[in-house]
Structure formats: C-alpha cells, structure tokens
C-alpha cells in the first residue's frame, strides 16, 4: 500500500471510531460532514403526557340524519372509524411521549409527527368537527354574516355550493373538503386522507368553517360509488348555524 493511501485509510478508520463512539451515523467524506440528528419534538414535561384527544358525544341519534345519511353508516362511522382514530392517536401520544398542550399545539407540529400520530390525530379532530357540522333539521341555507361572506367570496350561495361540490368530486381517493376563513376571505379546498387546514404544512390554510368527509366509509353503504348523490343530499343536513358561529 502506498504511503498516501495508507494515511487516508488510517484517517478514515480513526474518524469512524470517533463517530461510532459518539453514537452518530457514519457518512462518506464526499458529503463533507456528519449528518445531524433529527430534531426532537418539544417535551414540556406536562403531567400525564399532556393533551389527549377525545371523541365528542354525537349530537343526534344514528337515525336522525335519514334519509340523507343512513343510520347504519352513521353508527359504524362514529363507533368504529372515529373511535379508532381517537384510540390510535392517544396510543401514539403515550408511546412517543408527545407532550402537547392543545389541539392547536399538536397540529402546529404536524409535519414532525409520526404517520400514526398525524393521521389518527387528524382523523380524531376532523370527525369531531364533522359531527358538529351536521344537524337533524334546521335552516337549509346560510344566513346573516355567513351568507354575506359567501356571497362576497363566491358571488352567490348557489355558486358556492357548485364550487364546493366540484372540489368534493375532484378529491381523488379519500379525503375532506373544507370551507375556510382565510383572513376574512372564504376559500374552498380539499385535503388528502385525514389532513386538515390546521396542519403546519397544509397547502390549504385558514380557520375551518365547514367540512365534508368524502372517504368511502362515510357513504358507501347507502350510495355505493355515487359520491355525487351523497354530496347533493349532504346539503340537506348542513348545520349552517354552527358554521356561522365559527365565522364569528
């Protein structure tokens, strides 16, 4: 072995020994540096692991939204799907020592969360919001400040419903469609899977006013593949008063 090559070999061996002793990953000289460890999520030492998600009580009976949403779908959706999201995210919070103080704090760090924590946290929150966005009887159109804001942003309530429906039909696969208030301007957008506009890395930003679940489990028993029929009938059970209160 030539002297110069031997010196390079010895230097590389010495570096590997130092890095290994420090418990750091070894990378090649071509990268020019040792890879930095992934930043840890904040640990604030909150009691009992800090904030945990909870499933809101369903504001109506399983049959209350008939015929627009059938009782069996609503029961399975609430007791199986939603309950599983809450259970799974709280397991992740404990297992991963995620000490957050609130839902907002949790979603402010969504991009740093594990897939289990992020997806199930979104599912827990989204469904709580969804149940409270529905009603068993009540006004079928927005009123007051919400109506004015919709007309200002979209031209008319009918145009808003048309644009919202397009977004719901255009969401490929599973996800959600949202009406959000972005600094006084109302916007329509969709998110994939269980993402929502509160995520720190969400493309759609704003305070949610209304949401529609377009996962197949939300409608498939009654509507099968007819998502358009589900969307059209959903307008009959929208809780416009709740959306108006969220607007303020």
Image: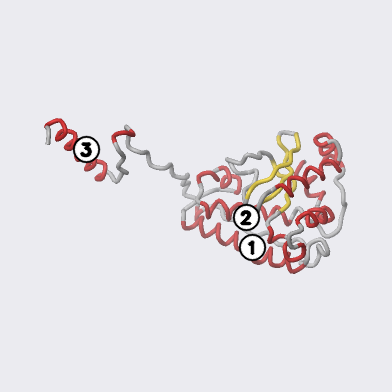
Per the model, the C-alpha gap separating discs 3 and 2 is 49 Å
The dot on residue 221 is: none
* Relative horizontal placement of residue 50, taking residue 15 as reference (left or right): right
Depth check: 229 or 111 in front? 229
Q: Nearer the viewer, mark 3 or mark 1?
A: 3
Q: Mark 3 and 1 residues: CB-CB less than 8 Å, in contact?
A: no
Q: Give percent across and percent down for residue 6.
A: 14, 35
Image position, residue 59 (x, y; %) = 76, 61
> Residue 190 occupies which quadrant of the picture?
top right
Q: Residues within 10 Å of mark 1 (few under 14, many from 20)?
A: some
Pointer 3 local density, CA inside 10 Å: few below 14, some 14–19, many at least 20: few
List the residue tagged with mark 1: 81
Query: Which residue is nearer to you in this view: 90 or 177?
Result: 177
Helix, strand or loop at mark 2: helix
* Residue placed under numbered mark 2 in the picture: 123
Q: Residue furthest bottom?
A: 72
Q: Which type of secondary structure does the marked residue at label 3 adopt?
A: helix
- For marks 2 and 1, give the CA distance: 9 Å
Badge nearest the viewer, 3 or 2 = 3
How many circles with numbers are drawn on the protein?
A: 3
10 Å crowding of disc 2: few (<14), some (14-19), many (20+):
many
125 left or right, relative to 59: left
Verify CB contact (< 8 Å) between mark 2 and mark 1. yes
Residue 248 at x, y = what percent? 77, 41
Residue at image point 58% right, 40% down: 201
Task: Say if 25 sits above or below 54 in the image.
Answer: above
Q: Give the left or right position of residue 192, taking residue 94 as reference.
A: right
Residue to which mark 3 is pinned? 12
Q: Is residue 83 above or below residue 242?
A: below
Q: Residue at the location (68% across, 56% down)?
A: 215
Where is residue 213? Give x, y as percent. 71, 54
Mark 1 element type: helix
């Amino acid at each position: 072995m030539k002297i110069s090559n031997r010196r390079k070999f010895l230097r590389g061996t010495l570096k590997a020994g130092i890095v290994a002793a420090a418990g750091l990953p070894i990378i090649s000289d071509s990268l020019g540096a040792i890879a930095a460890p992934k930043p840890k999520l904040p640990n604030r030492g909150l009691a009992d692991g800090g904030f945990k998600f909870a499933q809101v009580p369903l504001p109506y009976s399983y049959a209350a939204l008939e015929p627009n949403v059938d009782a069996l779908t609503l029961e399975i959706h609430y007791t199986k799907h939603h309950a599983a999201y809450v259970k799974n995210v709280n397991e992740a919070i404990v297992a991963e020592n995620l000490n957050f103080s609130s839902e907002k704090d949790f979603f402010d760090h969504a991009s740093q969360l594990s897939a289990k924590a992020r997806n199930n946290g979104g599912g827990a929150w989204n469904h709580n919001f969804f149940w409270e966005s529905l009603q068993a009887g009540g006004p079928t159109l927005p009123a007051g400040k919400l109506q004015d804001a919709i007309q200002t942003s979209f031209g008319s309530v009918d145009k808003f419903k048309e644009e919202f429906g397009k977004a719901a039909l255009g969401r490929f696969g599973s996800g959600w469609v949202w009406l959000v208030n972005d600094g006084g301007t109302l916007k329509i957008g969709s998110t994939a899977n269980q993402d929502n506009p509160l995520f720190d890395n969400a493309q759609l930003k704003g305070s949610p006013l209304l949401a529609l679940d377009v996962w197949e489990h939300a409608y498939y028993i009654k509507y099968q593949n007819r998502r358009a029929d589900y969307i059209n009938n959903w307008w009959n059970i929208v809780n416009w008063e709740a959306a108006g209160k969220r607007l303020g």
